[in-house]
Structure formats: C-alpha cells, structure tokens
Image (cartoon, rainbow, N blue to C red):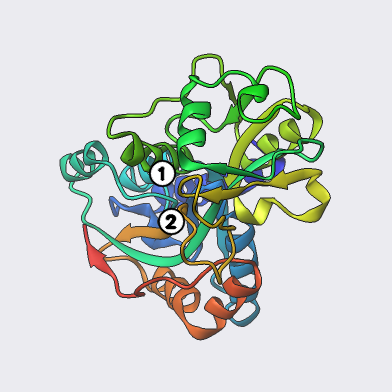
Amino acid sequence: MKAAQLIALILCLSCQLFCISCGNKPDSRAQTPMVCVTGSDTMETLLSAWSKDFMKDKPKEPVSLTLVSTGTGINSLIERNSDMAAASREMLDSEKAEAKAKDAKLKKVMVAKDFIAVVTNSTNPINELTLEQLASVFSGRTKKWQELSPKYKGDIVLVMREPDAGSTKFFLSHLAKLEGKEVKSAPGAKVSSSNETIVDEVAKNKMAIGFVAFPYTHSECKTKTIKIKKDKTSKSTQPIASDTSYPFIRPLYFFFDANAKQEVKDFIGYCTGERGQNLAKMRGFAPPDSTGAQEI
C-alpha cells in the first residue's frame, strides 16, 4: 500500500475510533464530516482530481481516499468502515448477500466509464491483437510471442492484478463471452498490486503483456498500447473516448448507504454534475450512461 493511501486510511479510521469513544450511535460515520472513500485504484487519478477540486468549495467536507481494490472498498462499506466504495465492477452476488446479512441498505450510481488498455513493452513490434488471440494469451494457451508474430521471439510473461480486482474480473469475463466458457488467468502469471506496478513491470520486461486502466498509459510509461480487433478481418480499435466500438469499456460506480450523510450526497452530486464530469473528461474518462442512483 502506498504511503498516501496508508495515511488516508489511518485518518479515516482515527475519525471513526474517536467518534465511537465520544458517542453512542452505532454508526460512527455520521459523527464526522469526512467522506471516507475506499475502493478501486483504477479510479485513483480521477478521485484525486475530484476530491481536490471539491474541497476548494467545501473545505469543511474533507475527502479521504484509500484506493486498493474494488473488493476491499465494498467490504469496507459493508462493514461501515467507510462512507463510499469506488468500484470498477458491479457488486458480486456474494457481496450483496453479505450486505443483506449486515443489514446494509446500499445504493449505486455510475460516475464515469473507463477503458482497459492492453499494454506491452515499447520494444514489442506487435501493434494489434484479436480478441481470440488475447483469450489464448491470457488463458495460457499461447505461450510464446512467435506464435503471434515471427518478428518477436520469447516466452510471454503475463502481468495482471489479483483475481478480486475489478479490472481482472471485467477483462476475463469479456474474453469468456468470446470463448463461451470461463477464462481463467494462466498459471504462473505475475500478480501485481496496482495498475502502476503492472506498467512498471511491463516497461522493464521485453516479454511482458498486461492490462491496465487507460489513464495509466501516459507517454512516460515506456509501454505500448495494443490496438484490438474483433477478428482478423475487422478494423482495429483503440481505448479512446471517441471510439465506442472498443471492446473493453466499463462503467465505474460509487456504492454508498441509502441513508448517507449530507457530505456524501454533496460529493456524489459534485462528481456527477457538470463540473465533475468536465474534469473526468479531461482525465480521459467517458461520461456515464446515467447519473441516477439505484437501489441494490
């Protein structure tokens, strides 16, 4: 966990412990104006920008960010250790059952869309891959680069997030639709703790390939973004907002309590409003289909 994330988590938990010691209400989150957000590190760049801009006008409503994974955020919300979960996937049935067991009445709102980009080392001569090739690579059936191109030789090194990460579940499930069966990551794949560590690993390993949230593919990464083709005869597509045919576009959500405190409502209103959405667009995110909250 990054130092900034650890500090944010300590601040958030400290506020909660203070409130528990000072009040008798069962939900300590209502006793502090701080909005504690936990969840997907895919949304780190976006949430950092949103929280800083939000607090310019609402300095008395601080926002604390602890961004590790979607699963971590949802669990923290259900356990009432945070106000909101930032998620790069839908809630699982098991998570919904846990929320019901803990009497956590939750809502969700789509706040943006992002793109999962497939990245290789910048020296890799391959510029595009089909969905079928990606499914074969990430399931471990294709093990060597020369099976994809005679211009490149060596063992393919897979780098990805942990199985619980929203990006992993989304990416593999979309490949599974092509396969008609579950696609599991290949045995021996390197598991990284964040999008940043995947980019770092791919940048230094000429044989590596991985997938990350698009905002992490900036020009300084020393990685290359692979264009995706539906099949061999299709036109290749890129992870950009203007290309809606790109196959790996996913919604990003906030999950929160149905009776959330006003500060949470204020922050959600900002993020889904014109100012927040303009900032999201500047950061490379696409607008949501709808900004209306739904019960889970």
Q: Determine the residue positioned at 64% across, 75% down.
A: 53
Going from N to C along the chain, the mark reached first, 1 or 2, is 1
Q: Determine the residue positioned at 36% across, 68% down.
A: 261
User: Could you tell me if residue 180 is visible in this image?
Assistant: yes
Position of 159 with respect to 186 (left or right) is right
Marks 1 and 2 in Cβ contact (< 8 Å): yes
Where does residue 243 sit, x and y in percent of width and height?
53, 67
User: Could you tell me if residue 10 is visible in this image?
Assistant: no
Q: Which residue is mark 1?
A: 170
Residue 253: assigned label: none
Where does residue 178 sit, x and y in percent of width and height?
35, 40
Task: List the single residue furthest toward the front.
Answer: 233
Quadrant of residue 218 within the rendered picture: bottom right
Where does residue 138 sit, x and y in percent of width and height?
50, 28
Type of the residue with mark 1: Phe
Residue 250: assigned label: 2
Quadrant of residue 96 within the rendered picture: top left
- Which quadrant, please, contains the C terminus? bottom left
Q: Determine the residue positioned at 30% across, 47% down.
A: 91
